Amino acid sequence: MSVINETSLVERLAARFGDMLSVNVQRNEVTAEVAPRDLVAVATALRDEAGFRFGTIIDVCGIDYLGYGKAEWDTDTAQGESFSRGVEGQAMGRFTWEERPRQVEQQRRFAAVIHLLSIELNQRIRLRVPCEDDAFPIVPSITPIWPGADWFEREAFDLFGIIFEGHPDLRRILTDYGFVGHPFRKDFPLIGNVEVRYDPEQKRVVYEPVSIEPRVLVPRTIRNDADLDQARAESADHWREN
């Protein structure tokens, strides 16, 4: 058995990178948080060094933590006071980052997440890169390391507005060239900002401010996963019996 197989991925990450990475393991998935300034060096080592060999990039995506951990369905009072009064209206798109619920501990609004695969060692890792500027989120591009990240980074830029510094052709890929805003940001209204119609007098398509009044149809709530709770209970019973 090789030294690589005898040590876990978490141990190898700690020995190689030290304080450059903050490693967390949940449900047997390894997530390592890395600062933007260290991303290129860490990513290059993860691709090239013998203990890692993460040669395949699976995905790059963006995250907006606005509204993270905040439910807007008040289940304590909704039963007696009807649906509309049960909705607090304090979740996604209903407050700014500065006005976010203070009980939610989230230091940065945006992050880029990179999923890597080592075919050689049959291991996976998730890199999370928090953007240090909430108003102008920016992280280094990893296209020089994994060229396959090209379109993934363009998607994250288009939908979340995250700038990937050093990208060879960072432009929108899913929305129109004249699109205003980034539709996956949590403060982007679900009904959009404009509506489109054909004007027979002008004989052309015109854009107008949206006339739909926003309202809560499906309130956001946070509940425990019953299947996972049951699995944990069964696993605990199994270990007690054996």
Image (tube, rainbow, N blue to C red):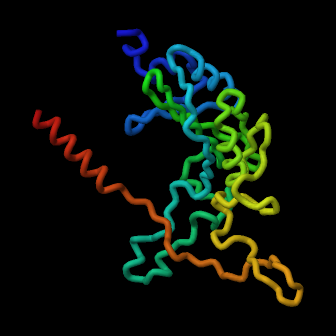
Furthest-left residue in this view: 241
Question: For the view shown, which residue lies furthest in the top direction?
Answer: 2
Q: Nearer the viewer, residue 41 or 80?
A: 41
Q: Is residue 205 above or below residue 184?
A: below
Number of numbered callouts drawn = 0
Relative placement, left or right, of 141 versus 48 is: right
User: On the image, which quarter does residue 57 sit in?
Assistant: top right
Q: Residue at x 50, y 34 (%)?
A: 31
Q: Is residue 49 above or below residue 119?
A: above
Q: Position of residue 128 (x, y in %)?
A: 58, 37
Position of the C terminus by quadrant: top left
Residue 55 placement, left or right of 95: left
In the picture, residue 215 is in which quadrant?
Answer: bottom right
- Closer-to-camera residue (213/99): 213
Which residue lies at the image location 59% right of the left edge and 63% below the top edge?
92
Q: Position of residue 85 (x, y in %)?
A: 49, 80
Task: Kindly give the residue lying farthest to the bottom in the view shown.
Answer: 201
Specify the farthest residue to the right: 202
Q: Quadrant of residue 6?
A: top left
Residue 30 is situated, as x and y percent measured from the top left of the image, at: 46, 32
Q: Is residue 91 left or right of residue 119?
A: right
Quarter of the rendering occupied by the N terminus: top left
**177 w.r.t. 49: above or below:** below
Residue at image location 30% in from the left, 56% down from the top: 226
Whole-percent x, y for residue 9 in the image = 45, 22
- Residue 215, placed above or below residue 113: below
Residue located at (49% from left, 73% from top): 218
